[in-house]
Image (cartoon, rainbow, N blue to C red):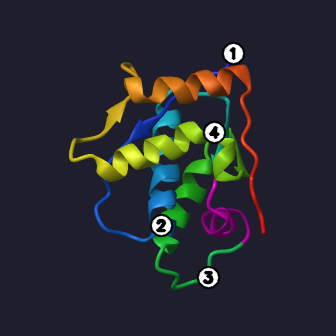
Amino acid sequence: MGKVLAGFSTPLGICSITRAELWGVLKGLRLAFSLSPPAISVEMDSKTAFDLITVRCPRGHPCSDLVKDIQYLASQRWAVTFHFIYREGNRCADHLARLGHNSVEEDFNFTNIPRSLFPFIRDDVIGVSFPRFIL
């Protein structure tokens, strides 16, 4: 079976960057779970959120509720792998995060892809890469 790509964007209101990333992972897992794939790969550009899920989330951490929900869903009837990537590695996700941040609408799923996402999808398909500058 080929890859099935899905995405979404949603306004979260005021919250920390880590909580927003974790909400995105949880909502993405819920969306993917409804499609019943045998396996899923989750790419995250927040090292903090990635470590909370894959390494350790201290008891009493402000995001421990989300991490527990993510870990529970990931342990269900499918294979879920988490990968840390730099933001430059997934410009589509970065653009969707900006759309959600600036949106006042409800959730939307991609049966109709926003036109503003087309250039990012095109770049991803043809393999355009962007260097990461580290000082």
Q: Amino acid at mark 2?
A: Ile
Query: What residue did someone put label 3 on?
Result: 58
Q: Between marks 3 and 4, how big is the CA–CA gap? A: 26 Å
- Per the rendering, the mark at residue 116 is none
Disc nearer the start of the sequence (1/3): 1
Name the residue type under label 3: Pro
Q: Residue furthest bottom?
A: 60
Q: Label 3's element?
A: loop
The residue depicted at 37 percent of the width and 30 percent of the height is 109
Quadrant in which the C terminus appears: bottom right
Marks 1/3: CA–CA distance: 38 Å
Specify which label sits upstream in the sequence, 1 or 4.
Answer: 1
The location of residue 115, given as percent across then percent down, is 39, 23
Disc nearest the viewer among 2 and 4: 2
- Residue 78: x %, y % from top left: 66, 37
Q: Which residue is mark 1?
A: 2
Q: Report x, y in % for residue 106.
A: 24, 41
Label 4: which residue? 77
Residue at image mark 2 = 17
Q: CA distance from mark 2 to mark 3?
A: 18 Å
Asked if residue 93 shows in the view, the reply is: yes
Q: Position of residue 48 (x, y in %)?
A: 63, 69
Callout 2: SS: helix
Disc 1/disc 4 C-alpha distance (Å) = 19 Å
- 89 left or right of 15 in image: right
Q: Residues within 10 Å of mark 2 (few under 14, many from 20)?
A: few
Closer to the eye: label 3 or 4: 3
